[in-house]
Image (spheres, rainbow, N blue to C red):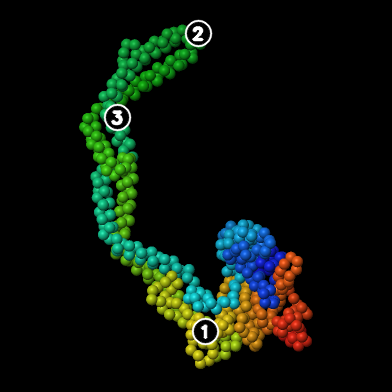
Amino acid sequence: MSLKSIFLRDFVIVRELELELANGFTVLTGETGAGKSILIDALQLALGARADASVVREGAQRCEISVAFDCPAPLRVALEDMGLPVDDDLLLKRTIDAQGKSRAWINGSPATATQLKDIADQLIDIHGQHAWQSLTRPESVRSLLDAYAGVSLSRLSPCWQAWRTAQKALDEARSAQDSLQREHERLAWQIGELDKLSPGADEWEELTTQHSRLSNAQALRDAVQAALNALQESDDSATSQLGRALSALQAQAQIEPQFAGPLEVLESALAQAEDAVHSLHGYARHSELEPHRLNELDERLATWVSLARRYKRPPSELPALLSQWRRELQKLDAATDLAGLEQASKAAEMAYLDEARRISKCRSKAVPALAKAITLAMQGLGMQGGQFEVRLAPLEQATAHGLEQAEFLVAGHSGSTPRPVGKVASGGELSRIALAIAVTTSQLGQAQTLIFDEVDSGVGGAVAETVGRLMKQLGKDRQVMAVTHLPQVAACADQHLVVAKHSDAGGTASTVGAVDGEKRVAEIARMLGGEKLSGTTLAHAKEMLGS
C-alpha cells in the first residue's frame, strides 16, 4: 500500500499542484524557506490532523487536498466496517475554507476527521525532525518496545479494567458496610410487611370486582327476580305475550305468505327470551349473599389500601413494588457479601497478573535484541563506540500497560556511561539516535509509506552517505520519502522532487516537480555549493549520481 498521488489547490502558498509519486526512495529538496514540508503538512491534514483557516492560501475561499493510495485487503475490511465505499484505490479528500470549516471524503463518501485518523496508521508513518523528543516520553518508549517485542495489550487492558472494577466494588462495600446494613434492614422489613399481604399480580382488580358484586348481592338478586317476573312468571309476561302473537300468526300463515318474515322474528325473540330466563334461573340458584366472604374482602382491601398509603403508591402497584424491593435486596446481599467480593477481586487480580507477567517476559526477551540492533545502526551513523540500552524498571503499582516501565539510555561514544536519552546534550547525536531507532523499527508498523522529515539534521559527510544508503535500502521493501538538505542523501534517491518558491504579479507561490538528468545534477550541485554553480560542484554532483 503506497502513496500514488497528491493534488493541492490553494494550500498555504501552493496555487495548484498535481504530483505522481513512485515506489522506492523519494527525496524532496529545495532552498530554505521554499516550503519543503508542505507536502507532509498536506498529507497529515488529509489523514485527519487538526485544521484551521491558516492553511488556506491568502485571497482564496478554501483549499483542497486530495491523495490516492493503494488499498490492500485489511484496509478494505476497515472501510466496510465504517460503511464506506471500497475500491482498488483509496481516495482521500479534504477541504478547509477561509473560516476554518473542514470537510472530508473517503472514496467520494462524506467522512469525519476521526475516520481519517482511524486509517492513518495503516497508510503513513512519519518520523519528524524532532522525533527524538518522543523518546523521552515513557509511553512512547514502551509502545516502541512493545511493537518490537510483538506485544499486544488487547488482553491486558480488559483484565486491568476488570480488576479495577472488582476492587472498586470491594472498596465501596467495605467503606459503606454500616449504611448498606441499614438499607438492608429497611428493605427486609418493608418486604416482610408486603409479604404478609402477599399481593398477587392481578389480585387488586379481582378483589375490587368481587367486593363490588358481594356488596350489591341483594340488589342483584332483586334485579334477577324482577327480570324473571317480567319475562316468564307474571300472567302477562314477555314469553306469554310472544307465544300468543306467534300462535295468532301461525294460524293464518298458510293463507298469507307475508307472515313468514314476522313469524321468523317472533320465533327468534321467543327463543332468546327463553335463553335469558334459563341463564337468570341459573344465576339465582348459585348467587348467595355470603356476608362472611364480604367481611374477608373488606379486611383484605383495607390492608391493601393501608400499605399503599404508607408507601405512597397506588394499590395496584404493590406487587411490582414488592418485586423491585426483592431485586434491590439481592443487590445489597451481593454488595455486603465481602467474602464473595474479595474472591472476585482476587480472581481478577490473578488474571491480570498472569497476562502482565507474560508480557513482562516478552519485553525482557526483546530488550537485548532491540538494544543490539539500534547500537549497530548507531555505528553506521558515525557514533563509533556508542552504546544503546533499554532498561526495564518495575513500577511501584501495576498499571493498564503492565508491571514495568521502559527507558532508553545511550552512550554517544566509547567509554562513556549510558544516560537517559533526554539527557544527551548534542542535538546532532539526538537526531542520529532517533534516525537509528527509526531505521531499526521502521519495519514494525503497518504503514507501507515511511516519511522522514529532516531527521538527518546535524549529520554530514560519510554519515550522510550512510543515511542515504539506509533509506534507499528501506525503499526496496517500502515506499520511503525524505525531506532533506543533504546532497549525499538526495543522491541515493530513486525519485527526486524539488520544491521551489517564486514571485509574480499574483504573489508568492511554491511548486513541486520531479527532476532528472542535468536538472537533477544542478540541484545536487546547488545543495553542495549554493546558488552559483561551478564546474567543480557540477562535477562532484555528477560523480555522486554516478553519471
According to the picture, the residue beneath numbered tag 1 turns out to be 424
Q: Percent from the top left, x then y, of residue 250? A: 44, 10
Q: Percent from the top left, x then y, of residue 85? A: 63, 58
Q: Earlier in the sequence, mark 1 or mark 3?
A: 3
Q: Is residue 3 above or below residue 221?
A: below
Label 1 secondary element: loop
Q: Is residue 446 above or below residue 439?
A: above
- Identified by mark 1, the residue type is Val
- Identified by mark 2, the residue type is Glu
Q: Which of the 4 image quadrants contains residue 227? A: top left
For marks 2 and 1, give the one nearer the viewer.
Answer: 1
According to the picture, the residue beneath numbered tag 3 turns out to be 213
Along the line of sight, the residue nearer the viewer: 398 or 283: 398
Density class for disc 1 (Cα within 10 Å; few <14, some 14-19, many ≥20) is: some
For marks 1 and 3, give the one nearer the viewer.
Answer: 1
Residue at x-position 46% and y-position 16%: 264
Q: CA distance from mark 2 to mark 3?
A: 50 Å
* Image quarter (top left, top right, bottom left or bottom right) of the C terminus: bottom right
Label 2 secondary element: loop
Q: Earlier in the sequence, mark 2 or mark 3?
A: 3
- Disc number for residue 256: 2
- Identified by mark 3, the residue type is Arg
Q: Earlier in the sequence, mark 2 or mark 1?
A: 2
Q: Is residue 385 above or below residue 356?
A: below
Q: Percent from the top left, x then y, of residue 414? A: 53, 91
Q: Which of the 4 image quadrants contains residue 66? A: bottom right
Q: CA distance from mark 2 to mark 1?
A: 128 Å
For marks 2 and 3, give the one nearer the viewer.
Answer: 3
